[in-house]
Amino acid sequence: MNQNINTYGKQASTLAASYNSLATPDILPDFAQHILGLPDKAASRVLDLGCGTGRDAFWVAQQGVAVVAADGAPEMLVQARKDHHHYLINYIEDAAPNLQNLNQLGIQYDTVLMGAFLFHFDAAERQELYSNMKSLLRDNSKLFITLRHGPVPEGRIMHSVPLQELDDLAKAHGGTSQFHGNKPDPLNRPGVSWDHVCLNLT
């Protein structure tokens, strides 16, 4: 994971220009629809794991929902605080899969966004991540996950995440998984596409 963190840190300003050119409802329509449909936005708590430049956390905060936005790259968080400051966002540096700082906050979330995040971890690290997330989840929580397919950018490490693994994770929590399809890359990078998955955990 250190290699990914270092790469994202070195490229923070360049990546910010690219990521911030996209709108959350356009690239995460199922997540956005969920946030807009929350019955009590003031009581909801959203966790943005691997928040990057804070684009999605900022959009959530604009809807009146409090967000904890975590990333392992301090340079990305500097960019996020610069570009996407909002009183409803608490940016926090934390390294997955242990999530030590998040667990120390003692907050539970009804919605977790893992956009372009989970595939940075190998199978063993993902299992550790799932275990460390348990104390962060409220009853009937939802996890929104996007998985990248295609060429891996230089300097980054990415792993395949089987959809069956996510289905098994949901079932282990007495819940279900929903596959929302494989969608084109919003930045039109050659050969890149994205799986969109929602886990409904009980």
Image: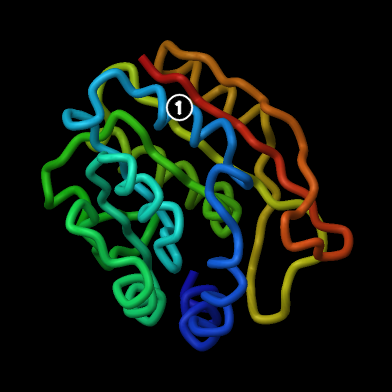
Q: Residue extending furthest right? A: 191
Left or right of 127, for residue 139 = left
Position in image of residue 137 (x %, y %): 28, 31
Classify residue 37 by image quadrant.
top left
Q: Residue at left 59%, top 23%? A: 167
In this view, the residue in front, 118 or 31, is 31
Dot 1 lies on which element? Answer: helix
Q: Position of residue 4 (x, y in %)?
A: 54, 73
Q: Is residue 160 above or below residue 190?
A: above
| Label 1 Cα crowd, 10 Å radius (few <14 / some 14-19 / many 20+) | few
Q: Residue furthest bottom?
A: 10
Residue 20 against residue 155 in the figure, above or below: above
Look at label 1 and name its amino acid: His
| Residue drawn at (41%, 75%) of the image | 76
Q: Is residue 82 above or below residue 90?
A: below
What is the quadrant of the C terminus in the image? Answer: top left
* Residue 14 sits above or below residue 22 on the image: below
Q: Nearer the viewer, residue 69 or 28?
A: 28
Disc 1 designates what residue?
A: 34
Residue 19: image location, x then y, percent: 57, 66
